[in-house]
Amino acid sequence: RKRQHRSYSPLMISGTPVERVSSFKYLGVNISEDLTWTTHIQTQVKKARQRLYHLRQLRKFRVSPAILKTFYRGAIESVLTQCITAWYGNSTSHDCKALQRVVRLSERISGSALPSLQDIFTKRCRGRATKIIRDINHPANSHFTLLPSGKRFRSLMAKTERLRRSFFPQAIRLLNSVT
């Protein structure tokens, strides 16, 4: 599809027009105007690649693989997986490959196997959904309703691929696949 460029009238707050920006960083997550995650992922990959230098230096000093793995988990994986349940499902395959390249490079440097981002996403998605289900007062608790059988959760209707790949439908599919 060709992108349609629409001209929007400026948003006014107290008579002052609000500046329109292409992306905005909110709570550490870059949100772009077209609601894609490419900007966020690119900045996270850049941060992680900068920290690979320190992992290489530690290996050069002959630090044990256990400490290298701990450094990876604290300094690199934490950057790559920040808010992963929000953005990973709707990221493009190109972005996922860029993220996975950093993980594979870290594996080679540290000399030990590291979990893939897909596995981390699945685990965190399942964990977050379980916490939401247990908390009756959580605003999103109503999205997780059991079917009459009491074993599986009711799937959300999603007409678009973007909604189908967002957190709630994926979390419900993950929970239903376990039971």
Image (cartoon, rainbow, N blue to C red):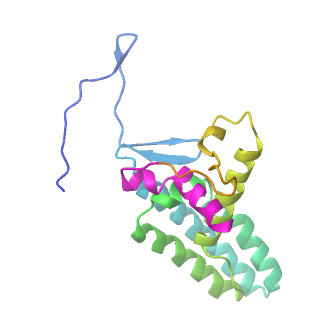
Which percent across, then down, holds residue 120?
A: 65, 67
Q: How many marks?
A: 0
Which percent across, then down, holds residue 73?
A: 73, 69
Identify the residue at horizontal 51%, vertical 43% (top origin): 25
Left/right of residue 173 with respect to residue 20 in the rendered view: right
Identify the residue at horizontal 65%, vertical 83% (top origin): 107
Query: In terms of image quadrants, where is residue 136?
Result: top right
Q: Residue furthest front?
A: 148
Q: Residue furthest top?
A: 14
Magenta stretch encompasses residue 166: yes
> Is residue 46 depicted above or below 128 in this figure?
below
Magenta stretch encompasses residue 31: no
Identify the residue at horizontal 65%, vertical 48% (top origin): 146
Query: In terms of image quadrants, where is residue 8?
Result: top left
Query: Is 40 in front, or is 151?
Result: 151
Identify the residue at horizontal 66%, vertical 40% (top origin): 141
> Is residue 65 depicted above or below 76 in this figure?
below
Left/right of residue 98 with respect to residue 140 in the rendered view: left
Which percent across, then down, holds residue 26?
A: 54, 40
Q: Main secondary structure of the magenta part?
A: helix
Question: Which quadrant is home to the N terminus?
Answer: bottom left
Query: Is 179 in front, or is 85?
Result: 179
Question: Which quadrant is home to the C terminus?
Answer: bottom right
Query: Is 50 in front, or is 28?
Result: 28
Q: Which residues are magenta?
A: 157-179
